[in-house]
Amino acid sequence: MSTTNPVRGRLNAGFFRLVDRYVHHVLGDRKAALFADLPGTVVELGAGTGANMRHYPAGTRLIAVEPNPPMHGPLRDAASRHGVELEIHAVGAEDTGLADGSIDAVVSTLVLCTVDDPGAVVAEVRRILRPGGRFLVLEHVAAPDGSPLARLQRGLRSGWRWAFEGCDLRRRHTGELLADAGFADVALERYRAGSVFLPVDDQVAGTLRR
Ligand SMILES: C[S@@+](CC[C@H](N)C(=O)[O-])C[C@H]1O[C@@H](n2cnc3c(N)ncnc32)[C@H](O)[C@@H]1O
């Protein structure tokens, strides 16, 4: 989705700020490894309230593709705290408006669960990346069928989707979608994050090179 409910949008922005330190505690090391060696300009899809800002070296130019206005204030605050030059593009990641083959690195964390058409987003990422450019992802995915976590995800799915504005706990094909999207190199790891947020604990992360 590329618009937000004014009330839930604000609540979500508040929620992501509230859990920021905890999420960093759980995923910080993995993200630090994933985001090592970033180029000077980075495109981040669904940058939210700026959870990844701490991983961008000061002086990085960040093009944040974030359609939801309630996220923009906290995102600007986070950018100024970390010395990141922020450009917000208030559009959906399905159509960024960026030129073909113009970008060295695209980041997406916990976003492909929420967009309406993840296939279109991944195709858009391929379009804007230069040959050799990198797509760095960290996403939650559906737990294996029959597992207790899968049952929990099914039970919470519709309420969760409403509360988190489109976030689908059972979006099962994110890993496969990435692996089959036509990138030259794909290095993805599936893991359990080990957080208290069990419904989103099953995750995939890694790098795809165009
Ligand atoms: C679960 S939050 C994750 C935020 C952040 N990436 C993080 O790791 O904390 C999902 C984000 O995707 C954004 N979003 C929703 N639909 C989108 C779309 N079509 N294109 C880009 N971002 C979108 C939401 O506004 C929200 O900021």
Image: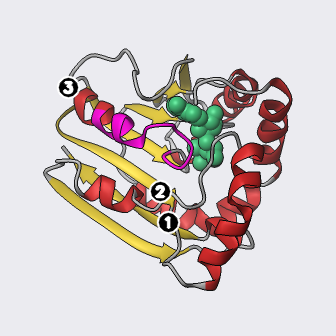
Question: Residue at left 83%, top 31%?
Answer: 10
Q: Is residue 115 above or below residue 158?
A: above
Q: Is mark 3 within 8 Å of ligand 1?
A: no
Quadrant location of residue 198? bottom right
Q: Is residue 10 left or right of residue 4?
A: right
Mark 2 closeness class: few <14, some 14–19, many ≥20 residues within 10 Å: many
Asked if the residues shown at circle 2 and circle 1 are in contact, with their CB atoms under 8 angstroms apart, the answer is yes
3D distance between C-alphas at marks 3 and 2: 22 Å
* Label 2 beta carbon within 8 A of ligand 1: yes
Q: Position of residue 22 (x, y in %)?
A: 75, 62
Q: Amino acid at mark 1?
A: Arg
Q: Residues within 10 Å of mark 3 (few under 14, many from 20)?
A: some
Quadrant of the frame with the C terminus: top left
Kindly identify which residue carries mark 1. 30
Earlier sequence position, callout 3 versus callout 2 = 3
Which mark is first along the chain, 1 or 2?
1
> Residue drawn 39% across and 54% down?
36
Q: In front here: 58 or 183?
A: 183
For mark 3, what is the residue?
101
**Viewer-nearest of discs 2 and 1:** 2
Secondary structure under badge 1? helix
Asked where in the image residue 196 lies, by quadrant, the reply is bottom right
The residues colored magenta run 112-123
Quadrant in which the N terminus appears: top right
Q: Is residue 27 above or below residue 96?
A: below
Q: Which of the two residues, 207 or 118, is positioned nearer the viewer here? A: 118
Residue kind at label 3, given as amino acid type:
Gly
